[in-house]
Amino acid sequence: MPFAATVYSLLLASSAVTTPAIEELTAIRQRELTEEEIAAQIEESRIERIESQFDGRELPQEIEAAAQAETPSGAAPASQTVRETVSEPVYPTEIQPSAVVAEPTAVSPQPVGGIRETTVTESADGIRETAITVSGQPLTPPTPITPAAAEAASEPVVAEKTEPVETLKIDPSVAVVVTGETVPASPLTPGTTATSETAQVASYSPAPVVPQQGFVIEPVSKADYTLVPPATLSSNLLPAHFGEELEGDEDILAARKAAQKNDVAQLKTLAARVKNHPLGGYVELWEINAQAEQDLKKNKKLTAAVEKRYARFIEMHESEYLAERARTDWLRYAAQANDAKRFAALYPKLKWNREERDILCMRQTFALGSGKPSAQALAQAKSLLLRTTAPQIDACKKLAARTLEADRSWTWQYLLILLQKKRYTLATQLVKETPAKYLPVNKKELSQILTNPSRWLQRNRKVLKKKPVRLLIAASLRIVQKDIGAAVTIAHATDGRINSSTKALLWGRIGYEAAVDQDAASLRYYKLAGEGLKSAASSTLIVNGATVLVWQARAALRNGTPQEVLSAISRLSPSVKKADNWTYWRARMLAAVGKKAQADKLMQSLVRGYEFYNLLAADFLGKPYHKGPESMKPEPSKESFAKFSKNPSVQRAVRFYALGLPYEGHREWNWALIGMKNRERLEIAEYAGALGLEHRRINTAASTGRAAAFNQLYPKPFADKINRAADEAQLPQNLVFGLIRQESRFISLALSSAGARGLMQVMPSTARWVAKQTGLKGYNNSKISDIDTNLFLGTQYLRLVRENVSPNVTLATASYNAGPSKAAAWRSTLTKEVEGALFAETIPYSETRDYVMRVTANTVQYSRYTNDPIHLTDLLGRIEPVPLSGNIIP
């Protein structure tokens, strides 16, 4: 793969890829993934490449045991995921506890970190109330929002469950509605009305043109935004030693490496030397953790001395992120020491980290106890094991063992869960360790299926009808990932022999795999699942049932009729159905079947915002794009900047950024945001811009929703260099800005976990290839992060992609992210010409799907600075099927 899909440097800038960083990365990247199949696999492969992000595909089984849960001894802090309803959700370039949004199409298993929820409700008289909670603990008192102030408020969202990252896939980036209005074969000019007499092609709708429906395309509103530079900071308002190398910096970096090795002696020495350094507290904590590791190895418990040090450290740093970090580490060690009392005392005090996957499994294991567990505790344990993304980590394996010990009758169901999660090694181990009397099928033959399902099928193809039905179910689930046809053959042998819920499980899974594989037969398989699929999807039997249903809707979009799409959308859960993408496509299909009034009403709910579906909805209705504040008014005061400069979390964050440790920097920065209302967040966003931290400026402003100023969300640093590189590559300048904003957030030294570097996240191998293709003399990879060189390499590669694959921006951006061969393969599966929006919505890689939507929406927004703003619908274009060729660039 030539390019990293998104900048992960902000997560993993250090040489060591730690599990917490991977967990955080997983939480942000998986906006809609089948998390059971992919999130854990990213951990296992150490975040290999974007190829491992295929929704329905998993990495080779050999790497299954590679990932283990992090112990607190690692130098990087543990992950946390906090979700907040905002107009522009978290971007893959950061750890943003204020706004992690998974895509509406998936039910994410248990989130990696604490959940921060912003719930906005609206009463009948138009009064909105906003309540913010962190893992159920109120953060700020409810803040009334009057109708007059609604413009600055986020779209009202009501959390229907207390675990929204799993069940509320609210994606503010997907707000679009389109009806089936007619569009002429040639582009409409502003003010032109299309009627059925002139319309030849329904360019804005996959549905047939509806006679006598005309609409007017209004001119795209030029934003007329002038980039306002951040307020100039006087030196006394900058954090101490900002922009300078600070004595002790090298010791901090050395301590981080020592912490990864649990080198107590080295950490003690370094801790004494950095006591007065802004990050000295981290070194002290790392030393305590390293001592705890030694205690556990020697005595299998923590000494009183270490526990006393933890308590003292937390007391000294109470209300700071360091205290949260220390509590989390101490709690994990307490669990390893089987200290239920200490665990129970620490857990309620966590703010961010109580929802981490290993901690949830630890907590539920303690809840089961050592004797006979209560029915409630047992049910909760089974539910968690169904939902968790990481059944392979020690804490969750321990929970599974304890659960099965308490209820052996659950063994078969857990085996089916593991097969759906594609945890084949765990499934094989489970069968091996389970006495034959607890298995409902022949243990030897079941082991053969799990080990080599293709060989088993080859030997038993003629006698499938005679095989026990449970054996057939296991065989079909085991083989479906690699051979859908074989899975179908085995599944048909169960015809008339299984109940409706099992039928929904089996054929729903096959339909899902085929849909992700973009197989037109997927709709037929979904039909075989029956009407019971909707109810079974939310049962304790099907893993990621919401994702299974979502891909049924996507399959219908690609290959079904408008009525089939509407039927599929109707099966989605209420929270998923309300997400912007499905609101949009529902409206499109309603228009296609002649229900224009309903379609327009749905579309109208989407037009306010800057994102992909917001723009498409405006296009559909012929309305100008949303125009928010041009710049922050009034400007931040010196007093507010002075306050930020003295904030310990801000000071630590800035120091971490200076040391090239953005993961830790994000944690501290986002801790500083807790409790801030929109005005204060916008001010600190400007402060970040003044410090040159454009990534913090963008993301902090985005967390305020529509209150953010346009130039905070879409800055143009390095404008001269970017414009020059774009012009030399004959690329639209707006496209390059839009791509960089998504790739690196304008961080010139950005480094992804896979090695992609610089503003445009160029892989070293791709850089060498581009240098050779373009005749760039004297190039070596030591120059890859140089701004001018990186821009040259990235823009030239994008030019080559457009020449080789397609000039279509939808395909070009998909190629840049996932690789040209992948984008070309997805195009080859089309059975008819489709609009770019439909192609984007059905991209199998969830990250690439999100990437394409964000880059194209960014491109449109950057065009609003110019005299020639563009429509997103025009930019996305239409895509025709093209057979695969062997002439695709790397």
Image (cartoon, rainbow, N blue to C red):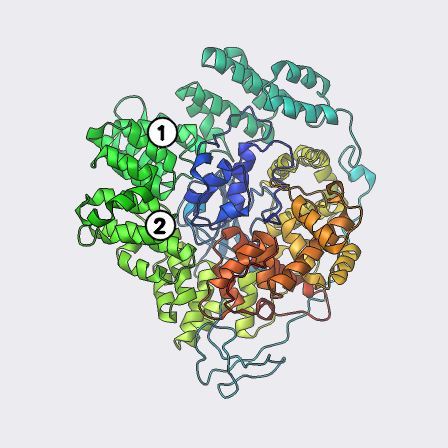
- Mark 1 sits on what residue? 399
- Image position, residue 692 (x, y; %): 75, 45
Q: Looking at the picture, which amino acid does disc 1 mark?
A: Leu
The CA span between labels 2 and 1 is 23 Å
Q: Looking at the picture, which amino acid does disc 2 mark?
A: Gly
Q: Circles 2 and 1: CB distance less than 8 Å?
A: no
Number of numbered tags placed on the structure image: 2
Residue at the right extreme, as displayed:
235
- Image position, residue 815 (x, y; %): 58, 56
**Quadrant assignment, res 270:** top right
806 left or right of 573? right
- Mark 1 residue element: helix
- Image position, residue 36 (x, y; %): 41, 43
- Mark 2 residue element: helix
- Label 1 neighbourhood size at 10 Å, few (<14), some (14-19), many (20+)? many
Residue at the bottom extreme, as displayed:
197
Q: Which of these two is toward me, 602 or 147?
A: 602
Q: Residue at x 46, y 14 (%)?
A: 301
Q: Which of these two is toward me, 646 or 372?
A: 372
361 left or right of 824? left
Q: Residue at x 73, y 35 (%)?
A: 658
Label placed on residue 545: 2
Q: Which of these two is toward me, 373 or 838?
A: 838
Q: Which of these two is toward me, 241 or 12?
A: 12
Confirm whether residue 344 shows in the render.
Answer: yes
- Image position, residue 779 (x, y; %): 77, 46
428 left or right of 712? left
- Label 2 neighbourhood size at 10 Å, few (<14), some (14-19), many (20+)? many
**Quadrant assignment, res 74:** top right
288 left or right of 584? right
Q: Earlier in the sequence, mark 2 or mark 1?
A: 1
In the rendered view, would you say 322 is above or below 453? above
